[in-house]
Image (cartoon, rainbow, N blue to C red):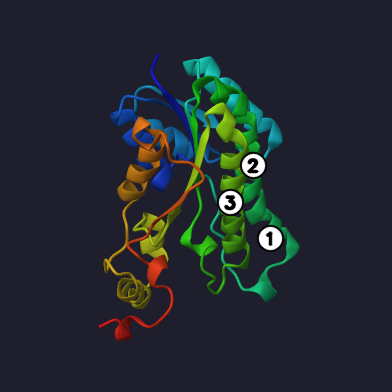
Amino acid sequence: MKQTAIVTGAARGIGLATTKLFLDQGWNVAMVDWDEAELTKAQSGLDRTVVLNMDVSNPQDSGRIIAQTVSAFGQVDALINNAGVADFGPIEGTDFERWRRVMSVNLDGVFLTSQAAIPELKKTKGAIVNIASISGLRASTLRVAYGTSKAAVIHLTEQQAAELGEYGIRANAVAPGPVRTKLAMAVHTQDIIDAYHDAIPLNRYGTEQEIANVICFLCSSAASYVTGQLISVDGGFESTGIGLPALRG
C-alpha cells in the first residue's frame, strides 16, 4: 500500500509545494485547508489526492481529517502541520481576540491534529513535521502573537518526540526563513527585499520547493534516526542574527 501524508494548509504556498513533492515521490496525499475554493483549484490535475475542507483549530474537524484520510487511503504515514495564519501587529494593537485567532490555528491546530493522528501513526511508525518559523527563534517587531505561537510549536515538537518515540513515531520541526511566496512578494517593498538579502548569508529568499524538500526528507526513511529536531531552512538568516551585515567583511 502506498504511503500517505496529510498536509494541512495545502491550498497554496509551502503546503501545495509539499503536496506535489510527495506525489512525485509516489505518496498519496490528503490535502487539508479551510479555503474550499482555493483547495479545489489546487487539487485540479493532481492524482492520488483527496481534499478535506476542514479547520484544524476545530477539535471535531481534527478527528474527521484523520478518519477521512484513513477511509480514502487506509493509513497515515506522515502528518505535516503547515496550516497557519500570519497576522502581524504591535503588542499594543493586539487585543485578545486577535491573539487567540493566531494561537487557535498556529498552535491549537498543531496540537489537535497531531493528537488525533497518534493512533494511526502508531500503526505505521510514522512522522510528524510541524512548520514553525524563524520568528519563533528570534524576536521581531509586529510578531508578538505569530512569533510566540511558532516558539510554542517548536517546544511542542520536542514534547511530541519525547513522548511518542517509544511508538516509533518521529516528530521534527522546520523553521522557514523569508520565502518567495506570492503573498510575500505582494507586500514586501523593494527596501524590505533588499534588507532581507543583506541579512541572509545566501543573499536571497528561499523558495517553497526548498522548504518542501526538507519536509519530505524528514518523512522519509533517510531520516529514520532524526527526531526532536528543528531545522532552520533560512539561508543562514537565524545563524547570523547578531551583528550588522555591513560588519561581516
Q: Quadrant of residue 139?
A: bottom right
| Along the viewing direction, whichever of 225 and 127 lies nearer the viewer | 225
Which residue is under mark 3? 153
- What's the residue at 61%, 61% (across, down)? 148
- What's the residue at 54%, 50% (across, down)? 84
Residue 12 in sight from this viewpoint: no
Q: Quadrant of residue 233?
A: bottom left
- From the image, which quarter does the C terminus lie in? bottom left
The amino acid type of the residue labelled 3 equals Val
Residue 139 in sight from this viewpoint: yes
| Along the viewing direction, whichever of 125 and 182 lies nearer the viewer | 125
Real-space CA distance between mark 1 and mark 3, rounded to the nearest whole angstrom: 15 Å
Tag 3 near tag 2, CB within 8 Å: no
Image location of residue 216, percent across then percent down? 37, 38
Real-space CA distance between mark 3 and mark 2, rounded to the nearest whole angstrom: 9 Å
| Along the viewing direction, whichever of 187 and 247 lies nearer the viewer | 247
- Say whether residue 77 is left or right of residue 214: right
Image location of residue 161, percent across then percent down? 56, 40
Q: Regarding mark 3 in the picture, which secondary structure is present there?
A: helix
In the rendered image, the vertical position of residue 204 relative to residue 4, given as above or below: below
> Residue 99 shows which numbered tag?
1
- Going from the N terminus, do you reach mark 1 or mark 2 first? 1
Q: Regarding mark 2 in the picture, which secondary structure is present there?
A: helix
Q: Regarding mark 1 in the picture, which secondary structure is present there?
A: helix
The amino acid type of the residue labelled 2 equals Phe
> Residue 111 shows which numbered tag?
2
